[in-house]
Image: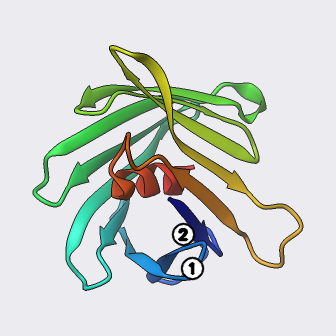
Amino acid sequence: MRIIIKQKYFTVGAKFEIKTQEGQTVFFAERQWDRFMTNVVLFTPDGAPIARMQSELKKVFTSWFSISDARGNQVCVINEKLPFLCFRRAVSSQGNLNFKIKAGPFHMKAYLLDSNGKTLAVKARKKLLSFRDTYVIDIDENRINPAYGVLVGLWY
């Protein structure tokens, strides 16, 4: 599944649509704030909540994000170390999914780690030379729930 977001979520209003390459709306997202964390809630097109992402910058070179399902069960938690030069690696510390994330300034790849080894599940990239910020997120639906893949791509 290929998802296209025309502007990154913090530059869009409180609610925005997430569409496929063909223009069909597959999710709605709403950004919520509290004093310390950023929350993004993902909804189905008919308005039912399906997942939530929370993230925060803990220290200068460490950030944290978690994804939970509609019932509040934690799917994954990632504590990320931000080394210099914008290349990031993160490994899931808790939850049902075990991710390894590699990212640079214009791309991100999230791999699922399991008994079969490392498998690409989510790939996000920023389109250059576009009028608006455009992000393309490719999700392997056989490996990961598309809602969780969208949230991993939004985190990037």
The residue that appears at 24% across and 83% down in the rendered structure is 47
Residue linked to disc 2: 9
The residue that appears at 16% across and 61% down in the rendered structure is 70
How crowded is the residue under tag 1: few (<14 C-alpha within 10 Å), some, or many (20+)? few
- The image's colouring method is rainbow
Amino acid type indicated by mark 1: Val
User: Pointers 2 and 1 in contact (CB under 8 A)?
Assistant: yes
Residue linked to disc 1: 12
**Considering only vertical position in the picture, is 67 above or below 14?**
above
The residue that appears at 38% across and 56% down in the rendered structure is 146
**Considering only vertical position in the picture, is 26 above or below 73?**
below
107 relative position to 40: left or right: right
Amino acid type indicated by mark 2: Tyr
Residue 37 visible, this orientation: no
43 relative position to 2: left or right: left
Mark 2: which secondary structure?
loop
Query: Where's residue 86, x and y in %?
Result: 73, 35
Residue 83 visible, this orientation: yes
Q: In the displayed orientation, state which residue is furthest to the right.
A: 129
Query: Where's residue 100, x and y in %?
Result: 48, 26
Mark 1: which secondary structure?
loop
The residue that appears at 39% across and 33% down in the rendered structure is 78
47 relative position to 28: left or right: left
